[in-house]
Image (tube, rainbow, N blue to C red):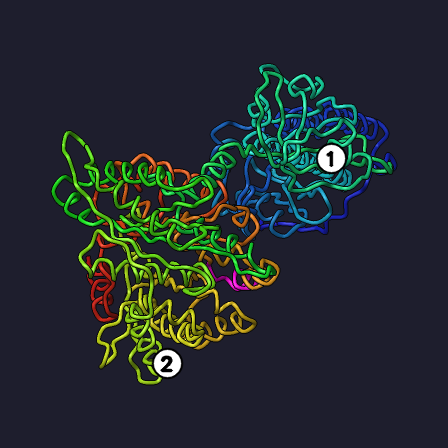
Amino acid sequence: MNCPPTTVLTTDTRPTEVDPARYRSMRAEAVLASEQSVLRLITRNTPLPELLSEVCRRAEALLGDGTACTILLVDDDGKHVRVGAAPSLPVEYSDAIDGVAIGPKVGSCGTAIFTRHLVVVDDIETDPLWEDYRHLALPIGLRACWSIPFDGDGLAVIGAFAVYHRTRRRPTAEEETMLRDIGHSVGLAVHQDRIARRLEQSEERHRVVIEHLHEGIVVQTHDGVVMACNPSAQRMLRAKDDLVGRNIDTVMRRAFHENGDAIGEQERPTQRAIRTGKPLLGLTLGLELIDGDVIWITENVVPIIKPGETQASSVLVSFNDIGPVREAQQQLRYLATRDSLTGLYNRAFLSDKMTAMLADGRGQDAPAEVAVLFVDLDGFKKVNDTAGHEAGDALLRSVAHRLLQCVRESDTLARVGGDEFVIAVSDFGEVGNLAVLAQHVLDTIAVPFAVAGNEYYLGVSIGISLSPSDGVDANGLIRNADAAMYHAKQLGRNNFQFFTSELNEHLQRRFLVEQGLRKALAAGELSLVYQPVVDSHRRHTVGAEALLRWHNDELGEVSPVEFIPVAEDTGLIVAIGHWVLERACLQAAEWRRTVAPGLVMAVNLSPRQFNEGLVERVEYCLLRSGLEPHALELEITEGLLMGDSETLLPMLTALTDMGVRISVDDFGTGYSSLSYLKRFPLHNLKVDRSFVAGLPDHHDSVAITQAVVAMAHSLGMNVTAEGVETPAQAAFLRSIGCDKQQGYLFSRPVGPLAYEASLLRIAES
């Protein structure tokens, strides 16, 4: 007849070592020998499966014939068990119980792990704990099962040790003690193995990370012997053999400061860090390698001070090769001052040069004599229309060459527009000398040009302004010379005119624009249109740039090209800019809620808006509209970044800390210093449309655009191309990794209803 269930759960009280008093003398020695054997296996780093199988076999020897021992381990998920060892049980049985869930009625082991107590089942056939598993045990002759849980750190249970018998029986007190002692040994072994595996995995992860870093890592002693070196460092230093154990001087000769001065041996960053015990971060220096080449790097040098020591005996050097970025910067420094087509100076350089020329006369008895000749080609558009842009470009280069022959070395010749040139002249003496120069230009350009097998006849219209009578700054002089040039065109072209009071018609228009602009905001005459920003690779709209428009009843539609400069000059741009920012945020928040959750709104900021209240104004607009900060991109000019960085940097930092993105608009249009790219928190560069217009056929435009994209990406920034008008331009920009595009190819700026309709079409497609 069947015996009643006799499951026994007892409190787990682990002994810390074998107590011979608890065993008969012969068994005590056997238990002690068994535990010592297990400890020897642990110290020898025996593989865990082998060690656990040995524990089971020794336990079976101690417990006598008819026993079979198993060790089950808690899986990494903490919810299932895995067979760690079962050397005397059939493989089919081990496979069947491998992976079973831990629970209150899961045989002896699953229950022991769940309850954290010894579980004794003296009759598998009748015990309810085995209801779901007795069909596995009985056919192979298993009748009783005792299971003791074990842990490794006194906290979480990590497995169970079990003893099967082929007869119905309970453990004696001595056998129960033996179970606990064996469980303790097994727990120690499993815990040690897990610690070793975690340490090994951690070390492997660190090794893999270090070896796959793009950044070079070198650890070297105070005398330069390399103790560790990752593949990136090996590659950048062009070391053919393993550097470990060699002196760093076997791959490099000298180091240089940014200005090219050599760094002395004792002044090397590694020596300074060891000497002072302080890290050196963000250093830029050149390294002359053993083959004579020089590479430029940025590096961090961190002294390594061992526990118990007060002075560093080695250093960790991490570094990046900035050669491509440095070359791109040098190329951009040159190109930033030059017109890409003709090689002449550009407008930005001209403005800086004229400012310096005018400053030379300040503080002297007589003001500086500076004159501006604004030269515009007559009939050039016909060449472009009939012969194509390639012929037009060749003609412009020929014009530039002839103009260079007309000016003195002290004069400054710049290309400021498509077919517009400016000559800035200082110390010209008599005004008549300017007339002589202008006539010389007329005569020089009048000679026919031979381009692509054809002859072309051009004329020029020239306007002349003088300081101080016609202006005291560069912008004023150029503006008035431009007005005089238009007067020359009105008088029949191919002549020169000096600026006079009669040429103030456009200035009168400016006055009307200013007066109307002062009332435009209150009168509700301003509005916003939106031009899509398209992801280059996915080719769908990801954002919009908010653009300002003005309609006045008297003046009609006033171009931003006309009224924005007036707003800047008068300071009206501050109030208007705040209005634009608020309206754009409200509109973006609405579109993100309704049709375009990922939309990013770009808003142009005037340099005049960067005052003490800008950060608060942006914060207010975001709060009022509910727009997430990362959905707002503020576009600023390069010129702003060249100004007062002590005032600007905290404001940009505060905006980026808020989550707002910062973009540099019209990038590459002329400033020579690019250090601000590293100094300021910038997220995006917008390539100026003047470069995009020459893609993909014009070498200089291609070179500049590729340099900008490469440099931006190396500094962790994105690139947006403006003025994209043809599929060929778009395809080229995609091919060089330009992130986003904007231009008439995708859409002209449109009103909010039209833009929303386009977003709806995208959402429905």
Going from the N terminus, do you reach mark 2 or mark 1 first? 1
Measured as percent of width and height from the top left, residue 418 is found at 28, 48
Image position of 320 with respect to 229: above or below: below
Q: Is residue 200 above or below residue 611?
A: above
Residue at 33% x, 41% y is: 403
Up-down relation of residue 558 to residue 61 (above or below): below
Is residue 657 on the magenta stretch? yes
Please provide the residue range marked out in magenta. Answer: 654-661
Q: Looking at the magenta stretch, what is its main secondary structure?
A: helix
Residue occupied by mark 1: 185
Badge 1: residue crowd in 10 Å (few <14, some 14–19, many ≥20): many
Tag 1: amino acid? Ser
What residue lies at 73% left-to-right and 31% top-to-bottom?
Answer: 268
User: Could you tell whether 39 is left or right of 612 in the image?
Assistant: right
Name the one closer to the observer, 143 or 668. Answer: 668
Residue topped by disc 2 = 518
Amino acid tagged 2 = Arg
